[in-house]
């Protein structure tokens, strides 16, 4: 059976952990849970992204007047969601799935 892919957020979590918490990475690798935790982080981040997107859409309706307004709205939405996902999920040094 093929293993589930790690995903973008899981890879970013791995990069952060390897750079800033090498001892924790080594311990997780020793107990064979490093990739499992990375997949778990990715799944949580993707679920959180969906929740934040729905919340943003409710609180900030998409403009209907002009390309520039829509582009600015989508850019702000992406920046806000990415910031929250990174600070609240990806950059957190978790060691259990």
Image (cartoon, helix red, strand yellow):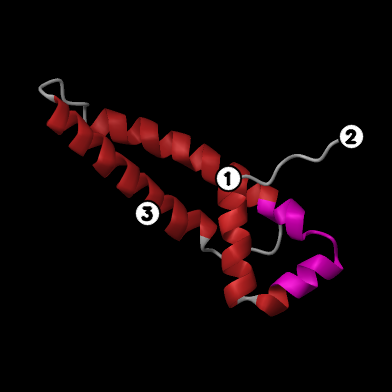
Q: Is residue 93 visible?
A: no
Q: Which disc number belongs to residue 83?
A: 3
Residue furthest toward the bottom?
23
Q: Residue 89, relative to residue 63: is it above or below?
A: below
Residue designated by label 1: 44
Q: Secondary structure at mark 2?
A: loop
Q: CA distance from mark 1 to mark 3?
A: 15 Å
| Disc 2 from disc 1: Cα separation | 23 Å
Under circle 3, the secondary element is helix
Q: Are marks 2 and 3 in contact (CB under 8 Å)?
A: no
Q: Which quarter of the picture shows residue 43?
A: top right
Q: Is residue 62 above or below residue 16?
A: above
- Secondary structure of the magenta portion, mostly? helix
User: Seen in the image, is 33 located left or right of residue 53?
Assistant: right
Neighbor class of circle 3 (other Cα within 10 Å; few <14, some 14-19, many 20+) is few
For residue 74: magenta?
Answer: no
């Amino acid at each position: 059976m093929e293993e589930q892919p790690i995903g973008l957020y899981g890879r970013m979590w791995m990069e952060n952990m390897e750079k800033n918490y090498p001892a924790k990475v080594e311990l997780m690798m020793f107990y064979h849970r490093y990739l499992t935790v990375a997949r778990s982080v990715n799944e949580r981040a993707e679920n959180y992204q969906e929740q934040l997107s729905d919340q943003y859409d409710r609180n900030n309706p998409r403009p209907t007047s002009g390309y520039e307004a829509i582009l600015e709205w989508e850019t702000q939405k992406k920046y806000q969601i990415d910031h929250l996902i990174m600070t609240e999920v990806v950059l957190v040094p978790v060691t259990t799935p």
